[in-house]
Image: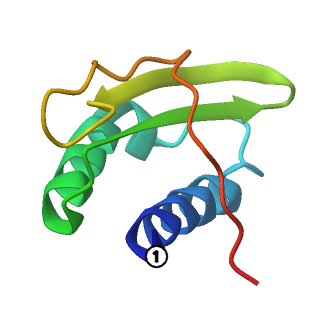
């Protein structure tokens, strides 16, 4: 669970720091998918969904991987995940 949280926090930070710009950062258009898939492989994460919203408009929405490590369904933008909180 800690690994999932770290990846989500890292992704949120990357997008939040770029949210002040008027145009989409080249990171989103050029290398986001590679960044996510490499992070999933490095941290052994079976799947995740990413949504980027800028100025109230969805600019990126995609699922990656599977819901379970073995024999899981593909993750898409409508996959529901259990969410935990680290306090």
Q: Is residue 50 left or right of residue 84?
A: left
Residue at image x 19%, y 60%? 44
Q: Position of residue 84 (x, y in %)?
A: 66, 61
x, y percentage for residue 45? 27, 54
Packing grade of label 1 (10 A; few <14, some 14-19, many >=20) is few
Left or right position of 45 against 49: left
- Of all residues, the one furthest to the right in this rendering is 56
Residue at the extreme front of the image, as rendered: 71
Residue 78's image quarter? top right
Q: Secondary structure at mark 1?
A: helix
Image spot of residue 61 (x, y percent): 53, 21
The foreground one among 34 and 79 is 79
Q: Please, which residue is most extreme toward the bottom here? A: 87
- Nearest the eye: 50 or 35: 50
Task: Tell me the quadrant of the picture where the C terminus can be found.
Answer: bottom right
Q: Residue at x 65, y 51 (%)?
A: 83
Look at mark 1 in the image and give the residue it sits on.
2
Quarter of the view holding residue 51: top right
**Residue 42 screen position, x and y as percent:** 15, 66
12 is higher (above) or lower (below) than 86: above
Image color mode: rainbow
Quadrant where the N terminus sits is bottom left
Up/down of 56 relative to 35, above or below? above
Q: Residue at x 51, y 18 (%)?
A: 77
Marks counted in the figure total 1
The residue lying at 46 percent from left, 76 percent from top is 2
Left of 60 or right of it: where is 83? right
Relative to 73, say whether 84 is above or below: below
């Amino acid at each position: 669970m800690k690994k999932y949280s770290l990846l989500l926090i890292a992704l949120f930070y990357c997008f939040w720091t770029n949210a002040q710009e008027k145009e989409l950062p080249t990171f989103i258009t050029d290398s986001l998918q590679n960044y996510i898939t490499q992070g999933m492989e490095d941290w052994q994460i079976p799947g995740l969904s990413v949504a980027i919203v800028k100025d109230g408009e969805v600019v990126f929405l995609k699922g990656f991987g599977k819901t379970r490590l073995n024999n899981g369904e593909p993750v898409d933008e409508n996959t529901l995940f259990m969410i935990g909180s680290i306090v």
